[in-house]
Amino acid sequence: MNKKAAVAVCSALLAVGTFSCQTDKLTPVPITLFSDQVVFNTPARIELQVNNLYSFVKSGSFLGGRYQIFSDIRGNDFINRTSNNVTGLGVWNHTLVETAQNDVVNTWGAAYAAINQINVFLAGLDANASKFVAPTFAADFSTKASQYRGEARLLRALCYHSLLQLYARPYTDGNGSKPGLPLRLMGETTDANNDLARSTVAEVYTQILADLTFAEQNLPLNYGASATTLNVTRAHRNTAIALKTRVYLTMGRYADVITEANKIVPATAPFVAPSGVPHALQASVASVFAVPQETTESILSFPFTAQNAPGTQNQLAFYYLPSSLGGNGEYGLNNAAGGILSNPGWAANDARRTAFVRAVGTEFFLSKYPTGTPYTDKAPVIRYAEVLLNLAEARARTISGVDPQALALLNAVRGRSNPAGVYTAASFASANAMVDAILLERRIEFLGEGIRNMDLMRLNTTIPAKGSVPAIEPSNSLYIWPIPATELQTNRLMTRN
């Protein structure tokens, strides 16, 4: 308010019997917002910024729900029931275009918003390093600052890896030589640097691995033995290692998968991470997804509360649970030929079927995420079970014959839910047969967790047909998503897929 307006307000208040006017109250400073000049002035404010980075990455439009859903419904294990364009119909039937707002545009926008938030934070942390001195900051705050850099860079790596699986050709197609993503590493507060050419797929992977290696070197081993929630929802050293096994598997660098996995997976059972958070398979797979979803098997998951929910039509349970269980039943499980339910490798008495599949009439639904409105199930990113199967596959692909450790790792995951279905060396005629069994196990174990598309893409495999939707060959232009129209309009150096 200007000065004349302030005088007028004061005069009016005096006329009705108010005897003072505090002009500073007319232009209040919001107590929940801080200027960029002071956000690095205290440890508490810096911590708030780190929490904010996680909030951006776990956006419901990105890794808070929709990304995992899109990555699963691209495959052939789910059937669309509602024909709702808002909830992934174009993803499911492979009819996406550059202007598809609810998937192509929003996923890209949410991911790059998170990446820029991370870049701005990293730049600010470096620019304000001279402030990190006593008495405001502890003497060892430089270590804490390095931890924050590690968390930020891990989240950035996760964002870029996730984007590659949808918007770029697989690494194995041309050994990373195909067009990747605009590799934005600077914090942008204006549109001055919008124009940025695509780096190659290999160049983006190089940055991802650099970020994860830095994170591994600077993140804490854990947040305390009793810090159950933080050990699941904040990045620690084993988070970086686990994600590196995923990245190397995606690249087909199987020897590197083995090197990384060996850091947190013993050579023999029982398989429990020997340092850092003691990750291990739970005795019951159902307990992994029982509220609050905070077992030592969960390496990283994004949390939600009633006051901080994923947002309308983003929630995992909304998509997968039938209405009788509190969801909207957007997608049911495919029980036709080729769908996971009809696969003879998934036994009827497998705990993953009895615990997570619900029949409603003649239809079947995934109940892995049990919480109805307001949908506060954690959004999973990576579990120890994945690390075990990553290692099993890498060993099966690089060691001749039926590798005993790969067999033990596969059986650890399979045997937990299907004790009668464990394999022996005689079960496989070749190492390739074991690889096929591992791929099937991944498909069963991670159903609804966003792994299916990743596995199809990294192997440059045809996306199978489902219902009336035809198969999509790797040579088909629909095999990867189009670059969003919003990026093409604002980045003059961007090229189409």
Image: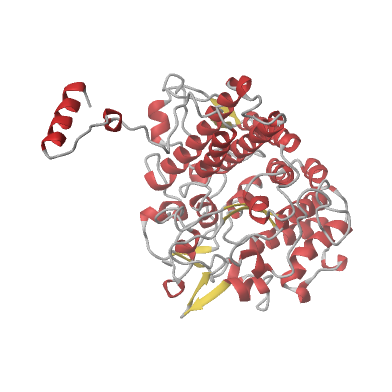
Q: What is the residue that sits farthest to the bottom in this orientation? A: 361
Q: Please indicate whether residue 429 sits to the left or right of residue 453 in the image.
A: right
On the question of residue 430 being in view, the answer is no
Residue occupying image coordinates x 66% and y 68%: 287
Give the camera-side residue of 186 and 420: 186
Residue occupying image coordinates x 58% and y 54%: 450
Give the camera-side residue of 269 and 363: 269
Image position, residue 330 (x, y; %)? 43, 63
Q: Please indicate whether residue 136 sits to the left or right of residue 308 in the image.
A: right
Q: How many marks?
A: 0
Image position, residue 321 (x, y; %)? 48, 68
Find residue 206 and report its image quarter: top right
- In the displayed structure, 11 sits above or below 302; it is above
Quarter of the N terminus within the rendering: top left
- In the displayed structure, 248 sits above or below 315; it is above
Image position, residue 373 (x, y; %)? 43, 65
Q: Please indicate whether residue 114 sits to the left or right of residue 143 in the image.
A: left
Image position, residue 223 (x, y; %)? 70, 47
Residue occupying image coordinates x 13% and y 30%: 11
Give the camera-side residue of 421 and 129: 129
| Image colouring | secondary structure
On the question of residue 424 being in view, the answer is yes
Give the camera-side residue of 125 and 86: 125
- In the displayed structure, 300 sits above or below 355; it is above
- In the displayed structure, 352 sits above or below 71; it is below
